[in-house]
Amino acid sequence: MAGRTSGPARYCVRPECKCARMNSATKHFDVVVVGGGPAGLAAATSAAERGACVALVDDNPALGGQIWRGETAHSDPEAAGWIKRLGLSGVERFCGMRVVDKAGANVLRVEASDSFCDLSYRNLVLATGARERFLPFPGWTLPNVMGAGALQAMVKAGLPIEGKRVVVAGTGPLLLAVAAYLRKHGADIAAICEQASLAALARFGLTLLRTNKVSQAFSLRRELSGTRFLTTCWPIAAEGEESLKTVTIRNNRKPERIACDYLACGFHLVPNTELAALLGCRLENGFVAINDLQRTSVPAIFCAGEPTGIGGVELSLVEGEIAGLVSAGHEKAAMKLFSRRTYLRKFTSALDKTFALRAELKELPQQETIVCRCEDVTCAALKRCDSWRFAKLQTRCGMGPCQGRVCGPAVQFLLGWNMDSVRPPLFPTILENLAAIPGNPGVELSGATRGTQ
């Protein structure tokens, strides 16, 4: 099942990975899957179990994605089952590596910490997941103000949270999941602030009754018994000098200040569509457009999971299976999963309606509030512009290390601008690696010029 290699190879020294890293080689696969979360695991495993030569690329050192990372990969039976199946299927894993560019037709350029390699594919499955949406408000750049999922990930990685007082705020099901996880690990959850109304959540509850997710919801509420849960409520300011000390929330149209050690804040999720856009896949309403077979507008490219619509783990797994089966040439087997996918997609539309951002949140940033954290661009500076492109040219908004992944969705909500271009490299890239690519102009890098682009 190993990939077919042309050119000299330099192999990875990571003991947890089976990847091969080459500066000047191309490895050939039937199917390449980008993303090691639920959708990617299902796609890679389904394709490999049907005889395809498969590679899986993920920028994390271990599989599971954001949702199944850390101990969850071992404690969650479903996660552990898929990771075990993947290990037995012969999929070649490129862990701790990320796609930064396309190197030609049906070829991706992948970067590790000190080298590039190229992966050639007959079919490609994009399972790049989603990230949290952040909205700027006064004090949101203070230390210990962070994304809800980000704080959960840091705790999974070893951050001590026991005895710390935490406010969880924003919108979406992730808030309850994060609050329950943090409380289980000893945090004192001061409040959960949900911007959606109680009426919207009640309607969402009726939708859950028609799915298998209602038991999950009741389980989370039991775990959070006694915790303040506030609706039509959101943070309006974070205060502190060197780090966070208090959070001011809008509760029943009145401000309320809460002392806390952490503010975990996220306003639902944003799909990671940058790679799809770079490869020419058509986007619709911010998501990758697909047909019934999970095929994008580019015939050899499939997409599964959150980039096609925020729908949760179960839908991601089914979409991943369909994409993996079709990419391996087994359309009839994939079609048997269509009814299951249709059933689960009802949850997606309910999520969109329930947790749509309210207009009042556009008033959160003040004139001096920083919107682009990478380049310290304020709200006032952006309001002097009339488009995303003009703002980039005049303020450098979106041109920092995150390449607009944080400020882009915020600006889209606040000002109605769309990010109108995606250019390689998709992530900051080591210049030494660029110089080592065959065919690039020779560059002699001194110690002072070595760094990232």
Image (cartoon, grey):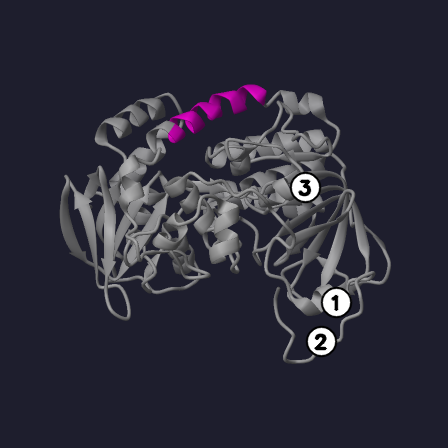
Q: Does 372 sit left or right of 333 as displayed?
A: left
Chief secondary structure of the magenta span?
helix
First in sequence: mark 1 vs mark 3: 3
Q: Does 8 sit left or right of 214 as displayed?
A: right
Asked which quadrant contains residue 208, the reply is: top left
Q: Residue at x 80, y 65 (%)?
A: 441
Q: Residue at x 25, y 69 (%)?
A: 241
Q: Give me the disc on residue 445.
A: 2
First in sequence: mark 1 vs mark 2: 1
Q: Is the Cβ of the residue at disc 1 closer than 8 Å to that at disc 2?
A: yes
Which amino acid lies under the numbered mark 3 shown in the image of this protein? Leu
Q: Is residue 300 magenta?
A: no
Pinpoint residue 336: horizontal percent, then vertical percent: 62, 20
Pinpoint residue 44: horizontal percent, then vertical percent: 66, 41
Inspect this view and state whether residue 279 appears: yes
Which residue position is annotated with label 1?
Answer: 435
Disc 3 element: loop
Which residue position is annotated with label 3?
Answer: 279
How far apart marks 1 and 3 lie (CA) works out to 23 Å
Asked which quadrant contains residue 413, the reply is: top left
Q: Which residues are magenta?
A: 338-352
